[in-house]
Image: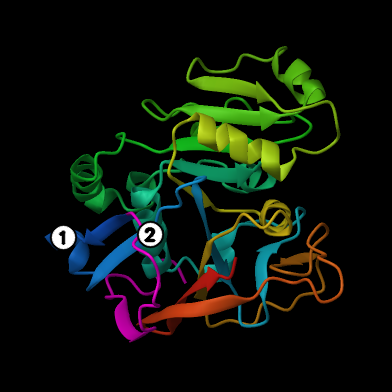
């Protein structure tokens, strides 16, 4: 399935009417011509005044699987999407708008050679994305924020050593002590957020805020997404629906049915469908969460 949906336009099928609301700052708009040829129309993110806007991006199978279990080969999103090129283009667009990309340690391990930039997933459009970010007044690359309680990271990972890509590792005191014993790259900064066994979502948000970021993009995994949902700080979800049923006997992760996403009876998050796009057999759904 490598290269599935190669070169297809993400055509707009439906957009929700703009709600009546007070004026808000927004980032984005019409895309540069090379990108607009693949994504007709505009792409804008509302900017919150009191904190960074948090946007999540996932690809899911028809039966709701977003990642295979940690023991699976190719446990990341590429296996779920069937290496959909259009899904990678959507990923690149969101990275292009983001100040920071937030990932969990499991996502880092699954993408063994991955770098969390637009150019990495769409090298043919690297110049267009660089120009777009300059026009938006953004830094050349978003900061990668890796969330790990244990500090159990491969410090030789490409995503921690890419030139020009700043990295922050958000971890606990124990995790920081572990990383202090390792040859961490000079572009990596370790931020300690407490003595517990988890990195609290609120503390993570403060790290994001401390970078000056207005838009944070969460790319998973599902456990991290669940923590952010439970803290009610996810504003939007971009969800690619890939046309496969992933059902397996092996352990899988589903977007909602993972440890840490329980909200209690009657207290779940509802979202409003904002837009629907299509590229071949892939659907691209955009949801905005209610406050």
Main secondary structure type of the part rendered in magenta: loop
Q: Which residue lies at the image location 37% right of the left edge and 55% below the top edge?
A: 92
Q: Is residue 10 magenta?
A: yes
How far across and how far down the image is residue 186, in percent?
50, 15
Q: In this view, does 109 lie to the left or right of 187?
A: right
Give whichever of 224, 193 is nearer the camera: 193
* Discs 1, 2 touching: Cβ within 8 Å: no
How far across and how far down the image is residue 177, in percent?
77, 16
Q: Which residue lies at the image location 40% right of the left edge and 78% below the top edge?
A: 19
Residue on which disc 2 sits: 45
Look at the image and tell me whether residue 57 can be seen: yes
Q: What element carries label 2?
A: strand
What is the spatial separation of the Cα atoms under label 1 and label 2, in whole angstroms? 20 Å
Magenta range is: 1-25
Scheme of image coloration: rainbow
Q: Is residue 197 left or right of residue 70?
A: right
Residue at the bottom extreme of this rendering: 13
Which label number is shown at residue 34? 1
Give whichever of 198, 251 is nearer the camera: 198
Give whichever of 10, 260 is nearer the camera: 260
Q: Does the magenta stretch include residue 58?
A: no
Q: Is mark 1 on a helix, strand or loop?
A: helix
Q: Earlier in the sequence, mark 1 or mark 2?
A: 1
Q: Is residue 20 left or right of residue 170?
A: left
What count of labels does the image hold? Answer: 2
Mark 1 or mark 2: which is in front? 2
Q: Which residue lies at the image location 25% right of the left edge and 44% below the top edge?
A: 133
> In the image, is residue 198 above or below residue 14?
above
Query: Where, by quadrant of the figure, is residue 104 drawn?
Result: top right
């Amino acid at each position: 399935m490598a290269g599935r949906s190669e070169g297809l336009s993400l055509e707009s099928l439906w957009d929700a009417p703009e709600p009546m609301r007070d004026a808000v700052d927004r980032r984005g708009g019409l895309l540069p011509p090379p990108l607009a040829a693949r994504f007709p129309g505009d792409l804008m993110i509302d900017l919150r005044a009191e904190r960074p806007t948090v946007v999540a991006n996932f690809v899911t199978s028809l039966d709701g699987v977003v990642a295979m279990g940690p023991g699976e080969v190719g446990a990341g999103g590429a296996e779920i999407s069937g290496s959909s090129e259009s899904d990678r283009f959507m990923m690149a667009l969101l990275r292009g708008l983001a100040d920071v990309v937030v990932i969990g340690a499991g996502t880092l391990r699954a993408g063994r050679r991955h770098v969390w930039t637009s150019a990495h997933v769409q090298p043919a459009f690297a110049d267009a994305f660089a120009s777009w970010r300059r026009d938006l007044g953004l830094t050349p690359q978003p900061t990668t924020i890796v969330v790990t309680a244990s500090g159990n990271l491969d410090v030789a990972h490409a995503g921690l050593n890419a030139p020009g890509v700043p990295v922050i590792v958000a971890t606990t005191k124990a995790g920081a002590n572990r990383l202090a014993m390792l040859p961490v790259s000079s572009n990596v900064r370790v931020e300690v957020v407490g003595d517990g066994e988890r990195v609290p979502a609120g503390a993570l948000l403060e790290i994001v805020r401390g970078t000056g970021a207005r838009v944070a993009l969460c790319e998973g995994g599902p456990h991290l997404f669940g923590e952010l949902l439970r803290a009610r700080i996810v504003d939007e979800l971009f969800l690619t629906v890939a046309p496969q049923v992933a059902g397996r006997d092996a352990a899988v992760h589903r977007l909602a049915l993972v440890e840490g996403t329980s909200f209690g009876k009657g207290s779940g998050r509802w979202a409003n469908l904002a837009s629907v796009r299509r590229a071949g057999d892939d659907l691209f759904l955009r949801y905005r969460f209610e406050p």
